[in-house]
Image (cartoon, rainbow, N blue to C red):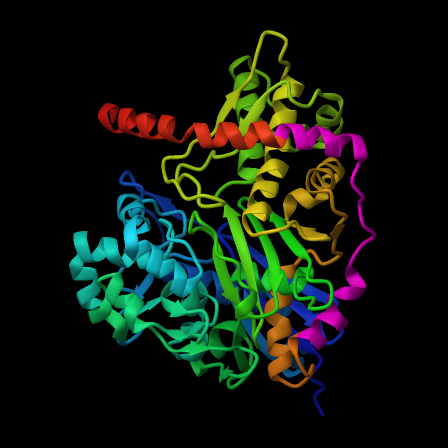
Amino acid sequence: MSHKDLLIGIDAGTSVIKAVAFDLTGREVAQAVRRNTYTSLPNGGVEQNMERTWSDTAAVLKELTEAIPNCANRCLSLAVTGQGDGTWLVDNNGTPIHDGWLWLDGRAADISKALQQGETGKRIYEVTATGINISQMRSHLCWMKAHAPDLLEKAGKALHCKDWLYLQLTGEFATDITEGLFTFGDFKTRTYSNKLLADLGLGEFKHILPPILDGTTTAHGLSAKAASQTGLPQGLPVSLGLVDVMCCGLGAGLYDPQNMPGLTILGSTGMHMRFVPSAENVTLNNDRCGYTMAFPGSAFAQMQTNMAATLNIDWVLGIAQQILASQGIERDQNDFLATLDDLVLSATAGKALFHPFISSAGERGPFTDPNARASWTGLDQTTTWPDLLRSVLDSLVLATRDCYQTMGTLPHEIRLTGGAAKSQALRKMLASALNAPVRTIAQPEAGAAGAAMMAAVKQGVFASIEDAAAKWVTPLLQEPVLPDTSLAKTYGTLFAAYLETRQALSPVWQLQAYARKELS
């Protein structure tokens, strides 16, 4: 008799695709990983081959099943999450009609900026509780209608990354309650909004929007084709997870109705989330920015997202590598990272002020401006290399504070995950900048874990997401890092300067964008 004691979560991110197996207590059993690839185009487009994305996903599942003894018979269910936003078009047979457009795609900058302005942008924000930016499917579809109508004419369904993988796994067209609602839905009714589609000028394309599923209540069986490619049994229940950041929220401790914490994910991008128990508690802001995403049940997460977080660190260390390489000195970036904490903590805060808008797509949280760019200000001849590094890390925690303040009061506790959570210096800096304890979680694969938790609820392992979080997440929360009183005072002073400078730079960014366009 077979014993079903494994759950598999797929997390198809921008950089890597992972398949992670967990036992029913939430312990990681094994994982398989494959690097992801995408193409940047001269017109600002960023695309990913859809067929390769599926073949890579099938490959990591196959590798995982071969690494675990008797995996096919032991697997109870499979769940999938993936990178958010973007547009992955297929025809009525489920065949791609173009490469997938990623969240990094910048083609819709002008259209998204126009949509943000005036009454139309206001109505869209009030219905979705989510601001408009260049990375979203709604901006992409508006751009296609204006510049590539043939794509929309061929489209049978408009999917996101995880939706495409769900189609390959099960043969079903679907999207989840997060991306379906924050893009084209009414957050209060949790259904598509015909009025919103009309405001966007996309009413005629409602038929390409797939059904919205909740993976804790609905699953479909693994298709025969997918079974042959992955080594898993045909008919295995497959749940469609929430978008990756929300699955990460589940796996990293955001779903906590008692404490209602904040959660910051400092990876390539920066995600700052707060738990909201119901639609009535959602807070809208005057800048009409940020995301509101649904959890299963009645709760939500509100979030502000920095386009670039650790990308700023990668950039500044990459510059150092280039300088050394020009002198014939080769240094690996890991060599820099190994000494980063000591260098940063020994430097003087405030010797330079950095704004971490290094992404060429601009910024989307806590304000939306595709022309926003990174800058250093306040330098003088005494500014040192460690001071510059310090200012980059300072900027990440100041940007985090900027985001939380836009969503209302600062949470009483912050849960932290992502690559930068490994830095002891950054944990201390973040706790001090937010004047709140910061707790990491001993769950390195929070996104895959969150997806697997949803599948576990559907299969009856847990009665609810709250029950799943209590069993899989709460025991893994680490001891809190407390604010440093002196450093908290320093950040209080720096934040005022950071915010005032950020607001003053807006007209400069517009002039710089004009200059870049004229010189290109």
Image point 44% across, 76% down: which residue? 189
Which residue ends up furthest to the top in the rendered image? 381
What is the span of residues highlighted in magenta in the rendered image? 466-494
Q: Is 295 one of the magenta-colored residues?
A: no
Residue 489 counted in the magenta span? yes
Give how far across and how far down residue 321 sits, in percent: 56, 23
Report the side of 140 relative to 16 (left or right). left
Q: Is residue 327 above or below residue 103?
A: above
In the displayed structure, 74 sits above or below 443; it is below
Residue at the extreme right: 479
- Give the overall secondary structure of the magenta segment: helix
The quadrant in which residue 144 appears is bottom left
Residue in the image at 29% along x and 70% along y: 195
Q: Is residue 407 left or right of residue 71?
A: left
Query: Left or right: 86 with respect to 379?
Result: left
Q: Residue at x 39, y 65 (%)?
A: 127
Q: Position of residue 223 (x, y in %)?
A: 45, 82
